[in-house]
Image: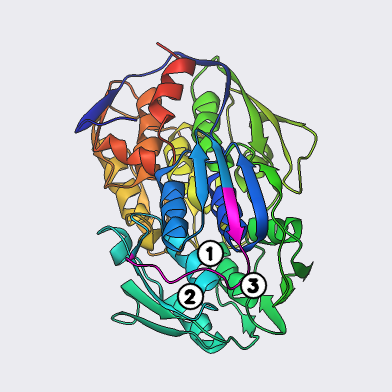
Amino acid sequence: MIDVDSLEITPATRILGEMSVPGDKAISHRLAMIGGIAEGTTLIRNFAESADCASTIECLRRLSVPIHHAGTTVTVEGRGLGALREPSQELDARNSGSTVRFMAGLISGCEFESTFVGDSSLSRRPMKRIIDPLRRFGATIEAREDNYLPLKIRGGLLTPLDFTMSIASAQLKSAVLFAGLHARGRTTVHEPIPSRNHTELALKEFGARIQTRENTIEIEGGHPLQGKEFRVPGDVSSAAFFIIAALGVPNSRLRLTNVGLNPTRSGLIHLLKQAQAKITAIPASISGSEPAGDLVIESSDVDGLDIGRDWIPSVIDEIPVLAVFATKTQHGIRIRDAAELRVKESDRIHSIATNLRALGVRSEEYPDGLFVPGRQILRGGTVDSFGDHRIAMAFAIAGLFAEDSVVIKNPGCAAVSFPSFYELLDLVKQT
């Protein structure tokens, strides 16, 4: 973990070697939460090392869920459905939007009052999208300006819901499905475009009565879940930075082991391969319902990409590093229908465009995305992480591509999702 005001990234001559990335953050959140309301013990191996997932564990403990966390192994002693206890203090999610949005659904059927708080960044991020459906279930919810933390929830008896999502959002879908576990009857969720399906897969593993078909998910509430053992695959969103590094630095070859290859999550890989990137996926045996395998990446002359509505849900986390990579492509990368980037840990569209300008790169900013032309030279310079982990890591990759060093202000925010990022980068980077 980096604890400095700024960090200098020097250009690379090659990316070479074999490595693994930490466990998937999105899957780890879900397994810990569902394990907390299951019956019996849930054992999670290769649990994500991120600060966000640590926030989830701490919130579960405040809800009286016994959890033992040793390295990357987490043991959750489930309390059973509806058996969480009223916390004696606020539930502090710190910087983790996933913790708040998922867990709000999880506790909406519990007959007590609890309040979510977070850091200054999370307190600026909108919660209205989950507030409205959870109120329709029957939960009582108060929020600052009816949209922001602190978020006070009083749960109780929930009524099943037939809910049509106006946007594709795995966090919103998960909040509704978690609330549906408590409702007596069938809750149905309709999504406009398939978003990542880790929640559906995990619920099936725990024994939930859940069915999926053509953008529709149905869950039957009121039935107990059973704890079990899991091994979390490597986080493909973390792997994305190293994939882009190996593609963009000449004469590179990198093997990433045990990476999650869930089709609803690996849009980056499919898009890049369509644009002639040299990426080979070597599937491994599936442990549980989440597919995984190795990736072999070689430096490539990539054409360019137009990324819009159908692809956004599966690449939303990778857009900052894709924007950096656009400078190395033939025709650039255009991103539209991604207005959600405006309300992440930072306004990522603005953060990307600002930092690209600082490195001498032209880009065109849209309300819902941006266009970065290809074949541009990245100069050295100083960029700002804006306190956003994915911006910090994306511009560390820019430092590998640049003519001169890139200095990142506040680089330590990468620990939110990937504390060992800079250390692993040094292991495969040759100068």
State the residue in front, 59 or 335.
59
Give the answer, above or below, for where 183 lies relative to 167.
Answer: below
> Which residue is under mark 1?
171
Secondary structure beneath dot 2 equals helix
Q: Locate the C terminus and report the quarter of the image it occupies.
A: top left
Mark 3 is surrounded, within 10 Å at the Cα level, by few (under 14), some (14 to 19) or many (20 or more) other residues, namely some
Q: Which mark is residue 49?
A: none
State the residue in front, 390 or 336.
390
Give the answer, above or below, for where 56 lies relative to 177.
Answer: above
Q: Which residues are magenta?
A: 76-90
| Residues at discs 1 and 3 in contact (Cβ within 8 Å) | no
Does 254 lie within the magenta span? no
Give the answer, above or below, for where 264 lies relative to 7.
Answer: below
Q: Which mark is residue 192?
A: 3
Q: Which of disc 2 and disc 3 is earlier in sequence? A: 2
Q: How is the image coloured?
A: rainbow
Secondary structure beneath dot 1 equals helix
Q: Looking at numbered disc 1 in the image, what kind of residue is underneath it?
A: Gln
Residue closest to the far left: 5
Q: Which of disc 1 and disc 2 is earlier in sequence? A: 2
Q: Locate the N terminus and report the quarter of the image it occupies.
A: top left
| Residues at discs 2 and 1 in contact (Cβ within 8 Å) | yes
- Image coordinates for residue 319, horizontal then vertical, percent: 47, 48
> Which residue is under mark 2?
130
Mark 1 is surrounded, within 10 Å at the Cα level, by few (under 14), some (14 to 19) or many (20 or more) other residues, namely many
Does 87 lie within the magenta span? yes
| Residues at discs 3 and 2 in contact (Cβ within 8 Å) | no
- Image coordinates for residue 249, horizontal then vertical, percent: 49, 21
Q: Looking at numbered disc 3 in the image, what kind of residue is underneath it?
A: Pro
